[in-house]
Amino acid sequence: MTAPAATPAEEALAAFLMALHARNASAHTVKAYGTDLGEFVRFVGPAELAQIDHLLLRAFLGQLYQRGLSKASVARALSSLRSFFKWMGREQMIDANPALLVSAPKLPKRLPRVPTMEEMNAALDAATSQEGCFAERDRLILELLYGCGIRNSELTGIDLDDMHLRQGVILVRGKGKKQRLVPFGEVAREALEQYLPRRLQTLEAHRGTGETALLINLRGSRLTTRSVGRIVKAMAVAAGLPREVHPHTLRHAFGTHMLEEGADLRAIQELLGHERLSTTQRY
């Protein structure tokens, strides 16, 4: 049987994702856009692009609310739509941008403020493309803090032997000397593989290869929590995040975004290493 022809919206989305790849957008960004916009494309079905107006966009966002999605998730979906329609406008695929007529939902104020997924994707993009004296290490720091939700002290306590590449997990030593296994994804694996040769070069140039720490400074010594804080703040400012962002902010972002994406609260508790569920429930 012949496969059904792609709808106008499906063709536009495929071209948009290709454009993101051409601009060297990270896998995080492409996946996030593909997920949000894929739902929208299925919602509008075979409609022509010119038939998609602000009322249809509002109907799509309305059904997200009906499914129980949070205001933050709906706001993120609208942000993806705005980027999509802005791009289609530049490509002269549409005559008007209906997303400009749709207001974003008012989000409740939270303390501390957690960066949105879009902001974190932008920060990860910036970390991937940055050039610096130890850019590979700094990118890995961001991937592990946000991608795994570990504490700053847990991050600096990781030894090279604690990284189990084949299983895709890290042995983490938490509060009270408690240990847990934390999974890491393919992007973190890639960041680790890019960092390890630089780590070895640094050790050979300064202290030999006897250091057990995963993360080291330019002198070949174990990185301190204070240094990680400075590195995270510098990357945050460079990526346009608030100056108050620190390593624990990324841990909060991990837990918040996992919850927004529908993860089980008990699973988040285990990943974060919280002893009490009430601590996790703050998210």
Image (cartoon, grey):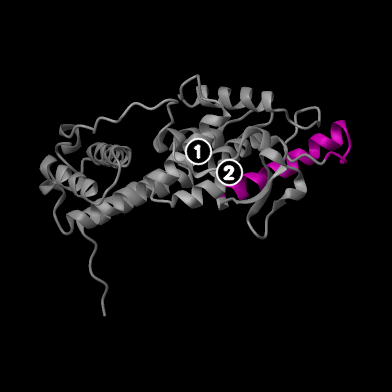
Residue in the image at 22% along x and 53% along y: 9
Which residue type carries mark 2? Glu
Depth check, front residue: 53 or 168: 168
- Nearer to me, 140 or 262: 262
Q: Nearer the viewer, residue 99 or 78?
A: 78
Residue 24 in view (yes/no): no
Dividing the picture into quadrants, the one containing residue 218 is top right
**Residue bearing the label numbered 2:** 275
Based on the displayed image, in which of its 4 quarters is residue 196 positioned? top right
How packed mark 2 is, by other alpha carbons closer than 10 Å (few <14, some 14-19, many 20 or more), is few
What range of the chain is rendered magenta? 187-211
Q: Position of residue 143 (x, y in %)?
A: 57, 40
Q: Position of residue 124 (x, y in %)?
A: 51, 37
In the rendered structure, find residue 279 and report the number of the disc placed on it.
Answer: 1
Residue 66 visible: yes
Image-based side of 87 in relation to 139, left or right:
left
- Is residue 196 on the magenta stretch? yes
Mark 1 crowd level (few <14, some 14–19, many ≥20, 10 Å Cα): few
Q: Is residue 191 magenta?
A: yes
Q: Is residue 117 left or right of residue 64?
A: right
Residue shown at the point (27%, 72%) measured from the top left: 3
